[in-house]
Image: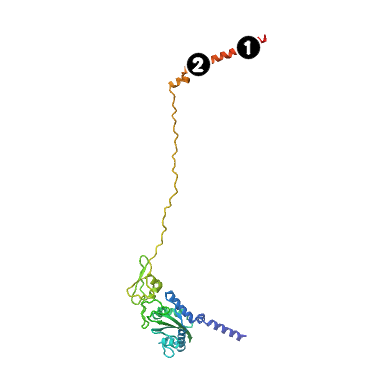
Amino acid sequence: MKNKRIFLFFILLLLFSIPFSSIYSAQETATDLISLINNVRNNNGLPELAVNSSLSAAAQIQADYLASQYGSEFSTIEDWHSGPDDEDAYNRAVIAGYDLGPGWIVDEITYAGSDSSTNNDALSYWLDSTEDAYAIYNAESFDIGAGISSGDGFTYYVVVFSVELGSGSSPNKGVSSTIPSLAATPEVAPVNVATPGEDGSLFHTVESGDALWSIAIAYDTTIEQILALNGLDEDAVIYEGQPLQVRPAFTPTPRPTETNTPLPPTRTPIPAQTAKAINTPIPTQAEEAEGILGMDNQTMGLALILISGVGLIMIVGGYLAKDKASKKKTD
């Protein structure tokens, strides 16, 4: 029972001693590495490279050779591109069955790391290297192959590119620039970033060693955007001293046009009317004296007295006559 526990203890210790990063790196493939490189090219306006099985076979041959020959002594490698029979990358691609046309060359980049290294580690190393970054961003490349191999605790990464120099007729033709010929060691100087103008626009003056891809990276833009801003086509070649617009001026936010909305018509107030006094003519004394029927007041008074007296006499006379008649009838 005790021996069994000791055995289980050593098994667990062995399991926990395996780095998880090594397990992860073993799951990564050469195809994944090619996808990473194509993503970088896409982000900088360059076309994807076509995966070629013959180039992948050539890359795998070199990766296996480096792992078998150098192992943990990879730091002493003097020629990373010399193969099993001292062949170079070009001849290795031909041996693997790749059909190279006239004027074509083969470019190769390599990286070695521990077993815990990943494809991203290899890509970061290449992008930090002027020569290796040049191979990744080369607009005249069109086919790609990759190989990964491990030996003596280290992992070796090899990527091979086919390049058609200067013909401009490659199947995945990219953008020409001031990238120097691959026949010589590329000298791509750091890009001196310009200061934005007051309106936010940015103009870069091309200097010796500048390339469209390096300018695009320095200003966090893409080659396509630079070409569009400057009215250049895909075959454009930039030259030293050329001003290139890399960022347009800021576009002010348009203000809405103020429109005066007419107000509805208002009624004109009618002023309050003040009652006017009516002048009633007051009769004069002469007019009052005329009275009714042209008689003055005095004459009118006498006439009324006379009429009243006559009426009274008639009433009294009628009453006496009635009384006299009544007596006669009684007798």
Q: Quadrant of the C terminus?
A: top right
Residue sitting at x 40%, y 72%: 224
71 or 224: nearer the viewer: 224
Give the residue type at disc 2. Answer: Ala
Q: Quadrant of the N terminus?
A: bottom right
Residue sitting at x 44%, y 75%: 42
Give the residue type at disc 1. Answer: Asp
Q: Is residue 75 above or below residue 259?
A: below
Residue 220 makes an appearance in the image: no
Furthest residue in direction right, as rendered: 331
Q: Residue 20: x percent and y percent?
A: 52, 80
Residue sitting at x 57%, y 14%: 314
Q: Residues within 10 Å of mark 2 (few under 14, many from 20)?
A: few
- Marks 2 and 1, Cα distance to the nearest angstrom? 30 Å
Q: Is residue 254 above or below residue 179?
A: above
Furthest residue in direction bottom, as rendered: 85
The disc, 2 or 1, on the residue closer to the chain's N-terminal end is 2
Residue 297 makes an appearance in the image: yes
Q: Residues within 10 Å of mark 1 (few under 14, many from 20)?
A: few
In the rendered image, which residue does mark 2 sit on?
303
Which numbered marker is on residue 323?
Answer: 1
Q: Residue 256: x percent and y percent?
A: 42, 58
Furthest residue in direction left, as rendered: 241
